[in-house]
Amino acid sequence: MKLQGKTVLITGGVRVGAPLAVELARRGANVALSYFKSRERIEAIAAEARREGVRASAISADLRKAVDARALVASTVAELGSIDGLVNMASEFYPTPFDKLTERDFDDAIASSLKAPYLAALAAAAAMRRQPVVEGVQGKIINFADWAVDRPYRGFLPYFIAKGGIVTMTKALAVELAPTIAVNAIAPAMIDPPPRLSSQEVEDIRLASPLKRIGAPSDANNLVLYLLEEPTLRRAKFIASTAAGFWAHQIKSGTVFDLTNRYDFVGIAILFEGSLIAIAGGLGWWFGIAPLENLQWEWRGPVWGLAATLPVFGLFLLLNRFPVGPLQKIKTFLVEALGPSLAVCRWYDLLVVAGVAGLSEEILFRGILQPLMGIVWSNVVFGLLHFITPTYAVLAALLGAYLGWLLDDSGNLLAPIVAHGLYDFLAFLVVARQYARRG
């Protein structure tokens, strides 16, 4: 997501959020900051952001109340025009010794460190879903957890329970809001210690962290900026820990498949395209047609296929370079819908997917349907099954007819298989490159 002209709301930005707000402003983003008690400090941060030439607002809100969370988001949209990112930093962090725990300690921790981010995320998501989809995205939500949720230390039990809830909330929200609102979480170690902690408590926490030092705001904020700007993160792929420097590990977000995940995309593509071979086999058995009857493993087939690829790929480049009229809609769809999946793949992943597509689709359409229905009607079906827009369906049908002619003229099914697979591979590379450039 390009930050220029976008609006990011930061909750609880007194310490770590202050340098983040200024950096966002330097990158051209408008900034809204919420405050509950620290009005003067937040207004000063907003003023510093405005000096970077953007709009910035400081808005009062008690995020433990749903009405305030909704009002905060509504004010952000009214004053700054949209809400494209939410950075949920609001939290309370102070020691609660086990032997002195009270019911109120638990209630306060849940309210400030779990309920408040939850209500802010719900309000922001509702507003984001009313916004147009731009490059596949309506908004991004970044929650702040804590690295010690997985390795807790003594004296902060209610706080860790609440922050553990942030991790689960992030994964569940990712499922609810996919695919147009990305939800991620950052789990920092201690950054800029709160004044409530004694020097000994700060030292104990420092010694418990992997790199044995207290983090700086930039440790977390650099990751926030990456998650906001990275175009391929469409759902919660990471709970990233920042422990004076960060490492990230992939987690399951509760989704069955994530098509912006390289392995999921390649696996699903191969499974889908491979299933067409099974369909071809079933139809061939039913109608008494041998789908591989015209397949000949000799060198002329690949040569025919390579030669036949050149004119159709050249036409693809021409139409892609000058997408007039309905062709622009096709180009936009390819880049925004397929681009995120293709861009995360290696070139050899795309070669495999394209090869399987060429093999399976040609066995089905040229090996079975063309002998059964003729070159015209088989490619009417081919076009309809590739329907994205009417123009795209027509172009697909014409391409199918071209491949059908190639089979008839060469007498070898290997020729259209090679042409189809190579054309898809080259087109994949072009779309992936265009998507990466737009990001």
Image (tube, grey):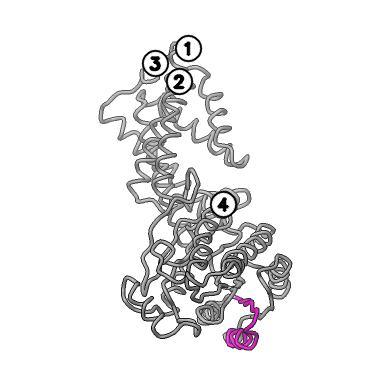
Mark 4 burial class by Cα count in 10 Å: few <14, some 14-19, many 20+: some
Which comes before the other along the chain, label 3 or label 4?
A: 4
Query: Residue 195 versus residue 326: which sits nearer the camera?
Result: 195
Q: Which residues are magenta?
A: 30-49
Indicate whether residue 36 is drawn in magenta: yes
Q: Position of residue 378 (x, y in %)?
A: 53, 24
Mark 1 burial class by Cα count in 10 Å: few <14, some 14-19, many 20+: few
Q: Residue at x 39, y 83 (%)?
A: 200
Task: Find residue 287 and name its label.
Answer: 1
Mark 3 burial class by Cα count in 10 Å: few <14, some 14-19, many 20+: some
Check disc 4 and report its element: helix, strand or loop. loop
Query: Residue 95 versus residue 232: which sits nearer the camera?
Result: 95
For badge 2, the amino acid type reads: Ile
Task: Find residue 418 and name its label.
Answer: none
Q: Residue at x 45, y 42 (%)?
A: 312
For badge 3, the amino acid type reads: Ala
